Image (cartoon, rainbow, N blue to C red):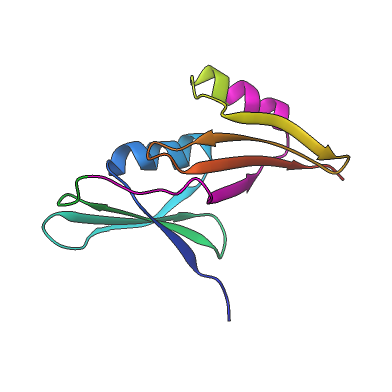
Amino acid sequence: MKFCWSTLQVKNMEKSIAFYTEIIGLEVVRKFSAGPDTEIAFLGNSDTKIELICDGTMGKTNVGDDISWGFEVDSLDEALDMVKEKEITIVNGPVQPNPHVKYFFIKDPDGMNIQIVENIH
């Protein structure tokens, strides 16, 4: 079995795509209409993808605080500078729980916890 994607219901597809392409660095692999009020987009740059679904009939999204998506970067310091430039609030960190990893958390436009991680080799 292979993990394919994780799905997130979003309120605004364009804001979400901008966040995941400009901040996280993912590419839009596919985007299509799935009915009169629904858009779906798959983003990623490897085998694993994220799926964003925007259903115009839904009033709100429901993202739990116990869930996060982690994205690895080459330099946590550069990532910190970039999110500060874009005026994205850092909600936790930076933290370095051991000599091999450091990270911080931000939120996407729908409140999903996003962990930005540097693995130190």
Residue at image point 50% right, 47% down: 26
- Counting labels gives 0
Observer-nearest residue: 120 or 96?
Answer: 96
Q: Quadrant of the N terminus?
A: bottom right
Q: Quadrant of the C terminus?
A: top right
Q: Quadrant of residue 103?
A: top right
Residue 101's spot in the image, x, y percent? Answer: 79, 42
Residue 24's spot in the image, x, y percent? Answer: 53, 40
Residue at image point 64% right, 25% down: 80
Observer-nearest residue: 29 or 37?
Answer: 37
Which residue is the extreme one toward the bottom?
A: 1
Considering only vertical position in the picture, is 118 above or below 32?
Answer: above
Residue at image point 52% right, 42% down: 113
Considering only vertical position in the picture, is 8 above or below 22?
Answer: below
Q: Magenta segment, which residues?
A: 60-82
Residue 65's spot in the image, x, y percent? Answer: 49, 45
Residue 84's spot in the image, x, y percent? Answer: 56, 19
Considering only vertical position in the picture, is 47 above or below 62?
Answer: below
Which residue is the extreme one toward the left?
A: 36
Please check the rendered image and state whether residue 115 is part of the magenta-colored stretch, yes or no.
Answer: no
